[in-house]
Structures are given as C-alpha cells and as structure tokens.
Amino acid sequence: MKKLRILVSLTTSDNDYQIEQAKSAEDAGRRLGMDLQIVYADNDAITQSTQILRAVQAAPQDRPDAVVFEPVGGTALPQVAKAAAAANIGWAVLSNDHTEIGRIQARQFAALLPKGGNVLYIQGPSENSAAKERAQGMLSAKPANIQVTTLKAQWTEESAVRSVRSWLKLSTSQKAIIDLIGAQDDSMAMGARHAFQEIANESERDRWLKLPFTGCDGLPKTGAAWVASGELAATVFAPANSGQAIEMIVQALLRGQEPPERALTPPSSIPPLAELKPRRA
C-alpha cells in the first residue's frame, strides 16, 4: 500500500485548539502510517496561501497527496484549490459548526444572565469565517435583554490581553456596566482575565474578576480544565477534527470511498446548560 504524504496547514501555533488539531493530525498520521507535514500560517491568509501553493507546485515527487487546512481568512482559497485539483491533489477544509457554537454560547449567556445584562464579547479576526459565523450564531440566539460590546483579537491569549488593555484605557470603559465576559475561544477568555488582573486598584480589579468568563473550544487540558477550576464559568466544546479529515482522505485515496461533501462534529456546552447557575449580583 502506498504511503501517503499529507500537508496540514493550521492557522497559528500559539492557540490551544490549533495545538490540539496538530496533535489529532499527528495521531492519525502515526496510526495510518503516512508522512505528515504540519505548517502554521501565523494568522496570515497570504502566508497560508503561499505555503500551500508552494507545496502544490513542487516537483511531482515532492508534492503531497492531499492538503488538509483550516482557513485563516474568509475563504477556502479557491484558486489554490483549483491548482491542487489540477495536480490531482486531495483537498480538505477543516471547520466546525461555528454558527451552532455561537448559538450555544448565547444560550450560556442567557442561563448566566436570566434577567439580561451587558456582555463584553471578544471576537476573532474580522476577516475570519469562523469568527464571523460564531458571532452571527451568538447574535441570532441571544435574548433581546442582553446587549453586546465587541472587541477584536487574534485567537491568542496575548492578543486578547492587548485588546482588553486598550479598551480599559478608553473613557467609555470607565462608564460601562459589564455583567459577563464572553470570548470566541478559551485562550482569549483567559487573556481577558489576565488583563483585568493587571488593574492596580484592588476593588476595581476584584469587581472585574468576579464576573463570569466564558469561552469556546473546551479542550480537556485548557477550556474544560478552566471550567473545572472556576476560572471560566462555561465553554463550548468543539472536538478537534483534523484526524477525522485525514481518515476520510485515506479512505478516499487508498480505498476509493467517496467522502461526504461536508461532515460536522457537533459542539456541546460545558457544563450542560441545565447545570449553569445565574451569576450572583
């Protein structure tokens, strides 16, 4: 049986979910006996496009048999996909049901703030499709009595620290009444916590840190562990799916099994929504 070569392109190496995606891919590669190359795009769509195109246009003996990637930007690189198809290279785009992730997070907001309130919402990059879909899902499912103030970050803890620091310097933040901090991933939620921990005034710092913080991704060693420790009030579990994608490619390329056009891994709330308790005033 031919030993397949797979190129896995991920968005960044300093995000807990992307690290888990890399691990999932590596586990599948070892289990299935294939050559695996993982590259990171440093949250830059042009870098990602260039990395993949370079591999696709390499000499035939150096090309991958398939590309598995999680898009940095708002598209799945259609021109690069055409080049891959012309070179007879398999193509798989990694994604979760981001709209449903956003809806679940909105339901968590509602459970934590049953009388309504104000959420400071930390969103991923504006051009990123996952960030857009999570925001759309959240806005479509949140109750009308919950208002949202949005900050932008880059799917990393440090970027969320910088974003919240900048917001705290604004005069509007001093007047803002915030009841909950919600972030589109767990690392950004923890970055927000760390930014509030830097506040010099003890009573002001404690006021912020007593608010519920929520995130998304819910991985066992990060988001789920932070919920268990009380650092996060809730998260949304989104299973890593790179290993599943690689298994589907193996079935298609080696066994001729036609894969489905789209396969989703369902997200879920941690803790279950019924177990979430309203925040104390």
Image (cartoon, rainbow, N blue to C red):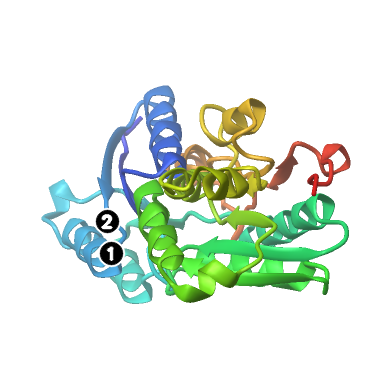
Residue 5 at x, y percent in the picture: 28, 40
Residue 85 at x, y percent in the picture: 34, 66
Query: Amino acid under label 2?
Result: Ala
Q: Residue at x 48, y 54 (%)?
A: 94
Viewer-proximal residue, 4 or 146? 146
Viewer-proximal residue, 201 or 72? 201
Q: Residue at x 83, y 68 (%)?
A: 143
Tell me how many marks there are. Answer: 2
Q: Quadrant of the N terminus?
A: top left
Quadrant of res 184: bottom right
- Does residue 50 appear left or right of residue 118 in this picture? left
Q: Residue at x 60, y 63 (%)?
A: 120
Residue 41: assigned label: 2
- Does residue 184 appear left or right of residue 109 in this picture? left
Find disc 1 in the rendering and name its residue: 44
| Residue 9 appears in the rendering | yes
| Residue 154 appears in the rendering | no
Q: Determine whether label 1 and label 2 are within 8 Å by CB.
A: yes
Q: Residue at x 53, y 40 (%)?
A: 240
- Does residue 33 appear left or right of residue 106 in this picture? left
Q: Determine whether the residue tagged by mark 2 lies in a helix, strand or loop.
A: loop
Task: Give the residue furthest to the left.
Answer: 59
